[in-house]
Image: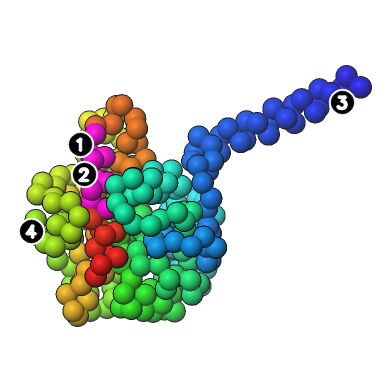
Amino acid sequence: MKLARLFIAIALLLSLSVCLFAWQRGFGRGQLSFGGESNVPSEFFFSRLRYNSGYANGNSFGYGGMRGGWSQDFPRADNDCLIVLRRLTRIDAPSPLNVVDIDNDSMFNYPWVYAVGVSNWAFTDEEAKRLRDYLLKGGFLMVDHFHGEVQWERFMSGMLQVLPDATVEDLKDNDEIYRVLYTIDEKFQIPGEQYVSTGRTYEQDGYVPRWRAIRDSHGRIVVAICANMHLGDAWEWANTPEYPEKFSGLAFRIVLNYITYSMTH
């Protein structure tokens, strides 16, 4: 009998530990919607793109599981950003966090999609076409957290598969996207959490922040590019005293402007 009670106590302790870990990582803060249509009515869904990481002989590496490049900082960064969106805008967003798969038709219901670590992404021809259709039908893609020349080339390899005629431009300070909600006159490099221990704002050879975009034939921005930066970390670590507020403050203003632009253009 005593041995049975001991086993029960150990099982309860393990269960409690798992729940506590999940809460600390952000899973306890709200629902998550994976790959399909959320059943919560909402004007806006904070949607993250789930993509394949590399192809070889028809096989993909890093898809679906939480270890794929698409899932960095998820769900904590997304959740913290969604909280700020609800507090600081009038966009109706009671929805849970949302993970979007390119091969699911529900992607076309979401006006804004966020993707990270995009130097690792890869597409089949069909996936590239579907993402192209999404963008040209009114979708907006924000990409973040890739650094240096090598990763830029890898990102562009996938991007040109999606939009073969894409022209990348450096966004000017007076562009409408920096006026649509907040007036953003000063932009600087937004580092990852490594800044706390190293004081470095850059990773690899990504010394200069790149605020870039791709437009459609009508001049609408369809891809907003945050290269040599890590906005996701700035959202995720905003409540950490050691991480400077100026980085998180700019990161939140940027994403709220990008979301507002996507909802109005």
| Residue found farthest to the right | 1
| Place of residue 23 in the rendered image (x, y in percent of width and height, measured from the top left) | 53, 37
Q: Quadrant of residue 212?
A: bottom left
- Quadrant for the C terminus in the image: bottom left
**What residue range appears in magenta?**
245-256
Question: Gap between marks 4 and 2, in whole Å?
Answer: 16 Å
| Place of residue 223 in the rendered image (x, y in percent of width and height, measured from the top left) | 26, 66
Q: Which residue is mark 4?
A: 174
Q: Which residue is mark 1?
A: 246
**Tally of marks:** 4
Q: Which residue is mark 2?
A: 250
Instruction: Say few, some or many: other residues with alpha carbon within 10 Å of mark 4 (under 14 / 14 to 19 / 20 or more).
Output: few
Q: Is residue 97 magenta?
A: no
Instruction: Say few, some or many: other residues with alpha carbon within 10 Å of mark 1 (under 14 / 14 to 19 / 20 or more).
Output: few
- Quadrant for the N terminus in the image: top right
Residue type highlighted by circle 3: Ala
